[in-house]
Image (cartoon, rainbow, N blue to C red):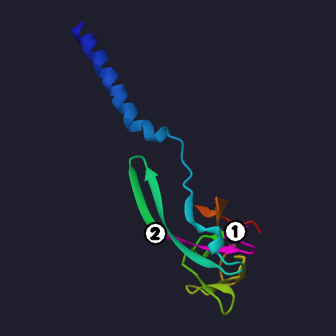
Amino acid sequence: MVAGLGAAIGGLLGGAGGGYFLSPLFRKKEESWIDIGRAADFLPGVPTKVEYIERRRDAWVTTERRSSAWVLTSNGQDFIVFDPRCTHLGCPYRWSADKKLFLCPCHNAVFNVDGQVVSGPPPRPLDRYAVKVVGGRLSILPQAQAATA
C-alpha cells in the first residue's frame, strides 16, 4: 500500500513538473508587431532607414537585438517596409539620394526605389516586412517575405 501511494504521489508530481517544463512547446506562437514610429513622420517618396529593438521570447528566455528597416510611402497612407539585407548574400545596403537607388557595396547590387533589381547578382527583389498602421503608428512584423513581382 505504501509503495502504491508513493508511486501515485511520484506520478502526480512528475506529471505536473513535466507539464511545466514542456508547456512552452505547446504555446501558440505570438506575432511580435514592432512599433517603428508615427506614420506621419515618413515623407512620401523618400526611403527612410529606421532602427528598432526586436524582442524575441523563446520559452523562458527573452532576447533583444538591434535591427533596422527601410520605410517607403508614396502617399503617407500606404507603406512598404524593406528588410535591410541584400537578397544576394545578406549584406546591408544603403539609399543613394543622388542616384535614387538602393546600392549594395558588397557585389555592386542595385535596386530601384520599389526594391526591384536594376543590376548585379541578386536573384530577387528586396524582401519586405508585413506592415500595418494603427492609431497613426506604423508597425512591422520583422519576418522577411519575398516580394511579389
Residue occupying the far left of the picture: 2
Q: Pointer 1: what residue?
A: 79
Which quadrant holds the C terminus?
Answer: bottom right
Name the residue located 60 percent from the left edge and 70 percent from the top edge: 83
- Residue type for callout 2: Arg
Q: Pointer 2: what residue?
A: 66
Q: What's the mark number on residue 15?
A: none
* Residue at disc 2, secondary structure: strand
Q: Residues within 10 Å of mark 1 (few under 14, many from 20)?
A: some
Q: Of discs 2 and 1, which sits in the foreground?
A: 1
Q: Where is residue 59 in the image (x, y as percent from the top left)?
A: 42, 46
Mark 2 or mark 1: name the one nearer the start of the chain.
2
CB contact under 8 Å: marks 2 and 1: no
**Compared with residue 100, is residue 127 higher up or lower down, i.e. above or below?**
above
Work out whether residue 50 or residue 87 is closer to the camera in this orientation and state it: 50
Name the residue located 57 percent from the left edge and 57 percent from the top edge: 33
Q: What stretch is highlighted in magenta?
A: 67-80
Residue 20 in view (yes/no): yes
Residue 89 in view (yes/no): no
Q: Where is residue 143 in the image (x, y as percent from the top left)?
A: 58, 61
Residue occupying the far bottom of the picture: 98
- Residue type for callout 1: Phe
